[in-house]
Amino acid sequence: MTALNALSSTPRLLLEAQLQPAQGQRFQPTGFADLGPARFTGPDGSEMLLVESAQSVANRLEMAVYDPATTEFIPELKGLPYVKVLGKNGQMLTSTILEAHRLNSPYVLEGSDKKIHTLLSEGFGNLSEGPVDFRVVAKILFKIDPNSLLHGCFLEKLDGRLRITRALTGFIEAAGVNPAESGGVKNDRVNQSGDTSGGYGNVPFSRTEFTATKLSAYFNIDLALLRGYGLPAEATELLIALALLKVRRFLEGGLRLRTACDLDVVDTRATRPADFVIPTTSSLLQSCQSLIARCKPHFIDPAVTEVTYGQDITKKKKKDKSEA
């Protein structure tokens, strides 16, 4: 892809998007258990707020190229490998697109079907002797599930040293924030003084949203990391194009982060290198299609590897709970 030639000597591609609420001025940030909104003070003393964490943005970037209606990648990415997990009835249970730990998901590696476990073990060779050759690891992961190289994978079920760092990261933060306090009441039209612990009665609640002078989304594509895997040139190029495509599609269609957090993009630009022109979504889709075809010899055949998780999920959960 011609546009990527400008990145040949760049170790990192940094992108920044300026955002604003789609309506009004308020927005609802992410919240954390026992913490609430993640507020902090910037180096200049300004009030800051984490609107979307790196782990959440990673999940949203993966979903940016997924079609929930078909439970597949979008049609333009047909042929890109991933692992689909089927239940005992043959229906789709989950996939490495959806699983938080991708190939390290217990549904992929710990079911009765050991297909992926065997593919990985045989591909990596004897890990008990000497250092891990991550070029070999990357080659196998690219063959079975290239997204694991973009979003990271910790294959501790095979070897505790098999840690693949995220090559694509992102987060959203706000500067110059002020709280916007409000609230409401959950009304019980039948029994207003009922036991609230059981969901009855009228329950007043408070709500904290925020305003900000600046809302920004940041993305980092670690080009040096991807090149360091020693993959064929077309494979590295596909990973970079796919990362850019995910960023584009997330910004263009995935910014309704919560009920009260619907954002619009004001401007998107590269900050390093500053003269890099981000390709359009349509050109990235075309490039990904072309590169997927070129990378077919490096992919597993068929591209979608199906494994069956034959265990009873309900019984497994009960067992885990009793053993806790």
Image (tube, grey):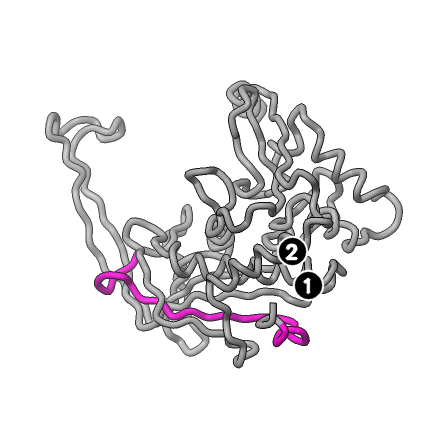
Residue at 60% x, 31% y: name it.
107
Mark nearer the viewer, 2 or 1: 1
Q: Is residue 225 above or below residue 106?
A: below
Q: Which residues are magenta?
A: 5-27
Identify the image quadrant of the N terminus: bottom right
Q: Residue 315 has which mark? A: none
Residue that numbered label 1 is attached to: 225
Residue at mark 2 to residue at mark 1: CA–CA distance? 8 Å
Asked if the residues shown at circle 2 and circle 1 are in contact, with their CB atoms under 8 angstroms apart, the answer is yes
> Residue 127: percent from the left, percent from the top?
83, 44
Q: Is residue 47 visible?
A: no
Tell me the amino acid under the disc marked 2: Thr
In the image, 207 versus 163, the foreground residue is 163
Numbered disc 2: secondary structure: loop
Residue at 57% x, 57% y: name it.
288
Horizontal side of 247 relative to 7 (left or right) equals left
Q: Tell which circle, 2 or 1, labels the residue nearer the N-terminal end.
A: 2
Residue that numbered label 2 is attached to: 165
* 7 magenta-colored: yes
